[in-house]
Image (spheres, grey):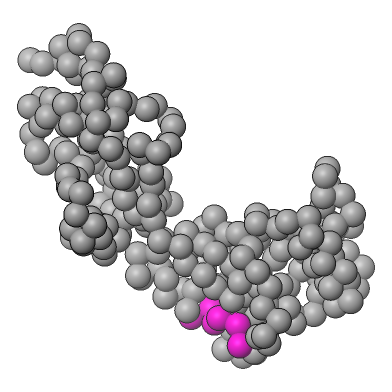
Amino acid sequence: HRQFVADGEALGLDEDGNPLAFQDTMQATTRLRPFFFDLLSLDGTSLIDRPLADRKAALSAAMPGDLWLPTIDTDDPVLADEFATAALAAGHEGVMVKALDSPYQAGRRGTAWRKVKPVHTLDLVVLAAEWGHGRRTGWLSNLHLGARGADGTFVMVGKTFKGLTDELLAWQTAALQTLAVGPPEQGYIQHVRPELVVEIAVDGVQRSRRYPGGVALRFARVRRYRPDKTAAEADTIERVQAMLSRGAAAG
């Protein structure tokens, strides 16, 4: 028997062998399957400083192929794009791109290791904002974001303060105060008239019991406000929900 230390991940798979969303994978009833993509040590010999190409060769010799995470070695951008597209179609959130001459880099990404995944954008409506604390004291910061419902109301799908510059914080604080509805809830959540549209970048969406639409944004951050759009032109809750079936929730 060979002794080795490998790096990999455990995935929950659906009936077709595609990865489940992260929150489904974490359920106690989900059966997990290991997949490996790197080898750190083999028979007592450290491989950490060896190039990735050598570690992959050692991995292939140490365990059967059905335990490897699928990879492709290429410098052809067309082949790389086809591989990434297939990974997304299978339900993965993206791909890792690694230089074949790179050593093992635990917990770090740099020029030799990069995570590549698509960025989705949604035009959502600001429903409320939270008065900040610390360096954001005095500014309306954390935005409560809603998608347009079928009946003309707005369905909350998440919050974010990511991507807001000091200049944008100052602008939105002034703008939102003109739209304020009543005193702040719990002393810090200022509800506003749903009029401002903001472009939000997300890594995808995931199922959620927290919000009435059943979906929540993943890693949302502000790109820009959209003064050219009215709230009636914001994205619908149906569009946000549809991102689940397109694999945008994988992870």
Classify residue 244 by image quadrant.
bottom left
Q: Nearer the viewer, residue 109 or 234?
A: 109
- Position of 217 relative to 98 (above/below): below
Residue 167: x percent and y percent? 79, 60
Residue at left offset 44%, top offset 32%: 108
Q: Is residue 33 left or right of residue 30?
A: left
Magenta residues (range): 233-238
Residue at left offset 70%, top offset 65%: 144
Residue 112 sits inside the magenta stretch: no
Residue at left offset 25%, top offset 31%: 101
Q: Is residue 243 left or right of residue 129?
A: left
Residue 209 seen anywhere in this rendered image of the structure: no
Q: Residue furthest top?
A: 44
Q: Nearer the viewer, residue 174 or 180?
A: 174
Q: How many discs mark residues in the rendered view? A: 0
Q: Residue furthest right?
A: 183
Classify residue 93 by image quadrant.
bottom left
Residue 106: x percent and y percent? 39, 27
Q: Nearer the viewer, residue 29 or 230?
A: 230
Q: Is residue 161 left or right of residue 18?
A: right
- Position of 135 relative to 158 (above/below): above
Residue 55: x percent and y percent? 19, 26
- Position of 228 relative to 68 (above/below): below
Residue 154 seen anywhere in this rendered image of the structure: yes
Residue at left offset 76%, top offset 63%: 168
- Position of 57 relative to 114 (above/below): above
Classify residue 149 by image quadrant.
bottom right
Q: Is residue 31 left or right of residue 194?
A: left
Quadrant in the picture for the N terminus: top left
